[in-house]
Image (spheres, helix red, strand yellow):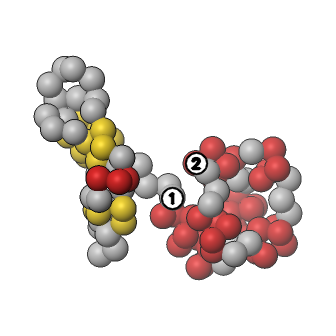
Amino acid sequence: TNQVTALTTSSMQALTTGQVEALTSSQTKALTSSQVQALTTSQVTHLKQIGVTPMVLDLDGNGVQTLNLSAGVQFDLKADGQKVNTGWVGGNDGLLV
């Protein structure tokens, strides 16, 4: 995260959308308001895609059970019509988006 916070606004504008998507959630949270304001509309769109985190509910009291990306589940996390590969919850647990 230290490297991300050291990026200048010019450096932020030079990032490709792929580089923006590659930012981890920790790196995204570390961005300053000046850095975020320097992003283009396209970059912000890709930045927002990584910031969506649903809440998993343990409905049966035995801990949260999850499925990984290889389970092949696609879900429209942002309600924007775009389904994305995602991890999923196991049986008897809930997903709140």
Q: Which residue is found at the position 16% from the left and 29% from the top?
A: 59
Q: Position of residue 26 (x, y in %)?
A: 63, 44
Circle 2 crowding by C-alpha within 10 Å: few under 14, some 14–19, many from 20: some
Q: Is residue 78 left or right of residue 11?
A: left
Mark 1 residue type: Ile
> What secondary structure is marked by label 1?
loop
Q: Nearer the viewer, residue 66 or 55?
A: 66
Numbered circles on residues, count:
2
Question: Which residue is the site of mark 1?
Answer: 50
Q: Is residue 93 left or right of residue 86?
A: left
Q: Is residue 7 left or right of residue 95?
A: right
Q: Is residue 56 left or right of residue 50?
A: left
Q: Are discs 1 and 2 less than 8 Å apart at CB?
A: yes
Regarding residue 78, the answer to whether it shows in the image is no
Mark 2 residue type: Ser
Q: Which residue is found at the position 30% from the left and 38% from the top?
A: 66
> What secondary structure is marked by label 2?
helix
Q: Residue furthest top?
A: 62
Q: Quadrant of the N terminus?
A: top right
Circle 1 crowding by C-alpha within 10 Å: few under 14, some 14–19, many from 20: some
Question: Which of the numbered marks, if any, corresponds to residue 25?
Answer: 2
Q: Position of residue 12 (x, y in %)?
A: 77, 68
Regarding residue 44, the answer to whether it shows in the image is yes
Q: Which residue is found at the position 86% from the left and 63% from the top?
A: 8
56 relative to 28, above or below: above
26 relative to 13, above or below: above
Q: Which residue is found at the position 61% from the left and 51% from the top?
A: 24
